[in-house]
């Protein structure tokens, strides 16, 4: 492996680990927070929003990459997702673990 390829390989492994972790955490949290009778509907809405948001995100990231460089959209998306979701995840995890 050449020295230029090593960071890409490390980033690919980190991205795979991070996306797997996110899937496990988000689905587990959804199953703990949502009542059983609504779980199917909530999961369907979650998937619909995710699949509809993907093309919009691709257009926005493409515009940003065109205006700046290819690294900027990834950084902006990761920081925005972390900033938006971290407080609610932390709050829901505390509430779910406080209730016996």
Image (spheres, grey):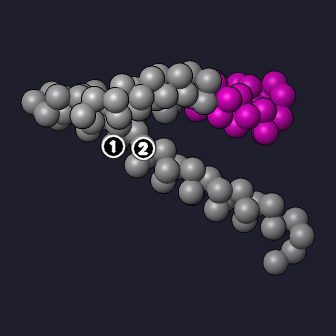
Q: Which quadrant, please, contains the N terminus?
A: bottom right
In the rendering, which numbered label is found on residue 25?
2
Do the residues bearing badges 2 and 1 touch, measured as CB atoms within 8 Å?
Answer: yes
In the rendering, which numbered label is found on residue 28?
1
Callout 2 crowding tier (Cα within 10 Å): few <14, some 14–19, many ≥20:
some
Q: Which is more toward the observer, 89 or 6?
A: 89
Q: Which is more toward the observer, 99 or 86?
A: 99
Residue 14 in the magenta stretch? The answer is: no
Q: Which residues are magenta?
A: 56-80
Check the image and name the residue furthest to the bottom: 1
Instruction: Examine the rendered structure and indicate whether residue 77 appears above or below residue 10.
Output: above
Q: How many marks?
A: 2
**Residue at screen point 87% across, 74% down:** 2
Callout 1 crowding tier (Cα within 10 Å): few <14, some 14–19, many ≥20:
few
Q: Which quadrant, please, contains the C terminus?
A: top left
Check the image and name the residue furthest to the left: 37
Residue 17, by quadrant, is bottom right
* Coordinates of residue 21 in the picture (x, y in percent): 49, 50
């Amino acid at each position: 492996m050449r020295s230029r390829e090593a960071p890409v390989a490390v980033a690919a492994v980190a991205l795979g680990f991070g996306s797997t972790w996110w899937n496990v955490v988000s689905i587990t949290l959804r199953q703990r927070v949502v009542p059983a009778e609504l779980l199917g509907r909530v999961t369907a809405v979650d998937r619909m929003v995710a699949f509809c948001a993907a093309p919009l995100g691709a257009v926005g990231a493409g515009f940003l990459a065109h205006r700046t460089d290819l690294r900027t959209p990834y950084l902006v998306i990761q920081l925005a997702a972390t900033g938006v979701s971290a407080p609610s995840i932390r709050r829901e995890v505390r509430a779910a673990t406080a209730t016996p």
